[in-house]
């Protein structure tokens, strides 16, 4: 059965399609067969019939009018004040659209919406006027992949592609596989190295003096050297030149480096998500000179002590200690020790 592939542009039903749909309904065809004949996804057929039927059943003319009126009325979130306030309040509390959508049923909302609907509302003209994009951890000027002219191959000595990374690292089930990145701020000399263990989501951070590859490599070694070898298997980076001295890290602590495809940040989405969460307390326009080492440690500690749904609502610290096989009260989080 044909479906809607990721990235495929969706088209609304036309009046001609609705007439054909009505004829197939009268023939007694199943929704799956109707979808096959119309070249639509089965779920699309179910939604079309459910949303646009009238008291006398599904009629093409009335279905076309109902769809048009619904389009003119705008998104459901914008139309219903209670729903709009519910979404806006929780965005301001730092909730993600997925968390808001997942919580609606538990909170007894009679008109729940999906996370995608919340994202669309946030980036709509009404959402922008209300300043909603600023509440998102990974906010951007507009949604979608940005177009780039040309393609520059990364110049990293002995670069190893992410395609060659061990299979066990991909599914986040094996311990000791990390992701690394740099956070930049208003001043060029303000740089923060961030690391995240993929299985436990434990995040570490260290201020570094520059983007120099040697400084970056030494900071990674400083953060991870105290861990046992089972906790430092691989690390995944983007293609920035600051990670060019990856072999220096491997020689020092045995941590093998792999690199994402160009312009593919989702291939190390864990650290991107962590950076977005840290941005709530360390915004890009801030100056790191206003933060002491204890301030940064406290911000990272707060991130690591927050329960995560993906961990069964354990904290990253608890999950990391469990993977190490030590009692939490006997273990000190690396990178967060007293300076």
Image: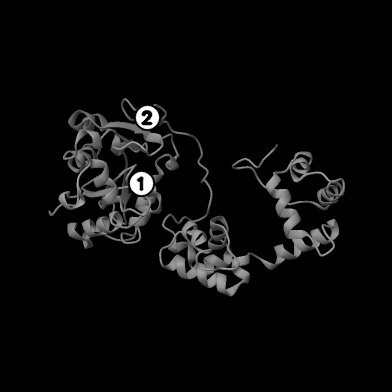
Q: Which residue is mark 2?
A: 165
Q: CA distance from mark 2 to mark 1?
A: 17 Å
| Residue sitting nearer the eye, 85 or 217 | 85
Residue 302 percent location from the top left of the image: 28, 59
The image quarter containing residue 165 is: top left
Q: Quadrant of residue 259?
A: top left
Front residue of 200 and 73 = 200
Q: Position of residue 96 (x, y in %)?
A: 45, 59
Q: Which residue is mark 1?
A: 271
Q: Is residue 39 above or below residue 164?
A: below
Secondary structure of the residue carrying tag 1 is helix
Q: Earlier in the sequence, mark 2 or mark 1?
A: 2
Q: Can the viewer see residue 298 in this picture?
A: yes
What residue is drawn where x is 53% and y is 57%?
115
Nearer to us in this view, 169 or 138: 169
Left or right of 27? Residue 305 is: left
Residue sitting at 76 percent across and 59 percent down? 52
């Amino acid at each position: 059965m044909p479906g809607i592939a990721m990235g495929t542009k969706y088209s609304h039903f036309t009046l001609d399609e609705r007439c054909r749909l009505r004829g197939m309904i009268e023939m007694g065809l199943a929704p799956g067969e109707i979808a096959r004949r119309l070249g639509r996804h089965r779920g699309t057929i179910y939604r079309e019939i459910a949303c646009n039927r009238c008291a006398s059943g599904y009629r093409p003319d009335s279905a076309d009018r109902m769809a048009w009126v619904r389009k003119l009325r705008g998104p459901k979130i914008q139309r219903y004040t209670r729903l709009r306030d519910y979404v806006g309040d929780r965005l301001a509390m730092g909730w993600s659209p997925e968390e808001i959508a997942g919580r609606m049923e538990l909170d007894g909302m009679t008109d729940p919406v999906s996370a995608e609907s919340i994202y669309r509302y946030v980036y709509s003209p009404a959402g922008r006027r209300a300043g909603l994009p600023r509440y998102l951890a990974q906010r951007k000027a507009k949604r979608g992949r940005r177009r780039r002219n040309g393609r520059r191959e990364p110049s990293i000595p002995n670069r190893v592609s992410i395609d060659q990374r061990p299979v066990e690292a991909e599914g986040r089930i094996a311990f000791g596989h990390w992701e690394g990145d740099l956070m930049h701020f208003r001043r060029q000399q303000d740089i923060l190295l961030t690391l995240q263990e993929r299985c436990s989501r434990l995040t570490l951070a260290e201020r570094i003096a520059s983007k120099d590859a040697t400084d970056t490599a030494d900071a990674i070694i400083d953060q991870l050297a105290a861990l046992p070898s089972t906790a430092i298997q691989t690390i995944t980076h983007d293609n920035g030149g600051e990670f060019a001295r990856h072999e220096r890290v491997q020689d020092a602590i045995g941590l093998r480096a792999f690199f994402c495809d160009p312009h593919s940040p989702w291939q190390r989405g864990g650290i991107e998500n962590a950076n977005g969460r840290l941005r709530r307390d360390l915004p890009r326009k801030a100056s790191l000179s206003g933060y002491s080492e204890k301030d940064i440690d406290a911000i990272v500690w707060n991130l690591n002590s927050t329960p995560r749904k993906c961990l069964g609502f354990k904290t990253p610290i608890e999950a990391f200690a469990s993977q190490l096989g030590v009692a939490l009260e006997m273990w000190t989080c690396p990178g967060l020790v007293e300076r």
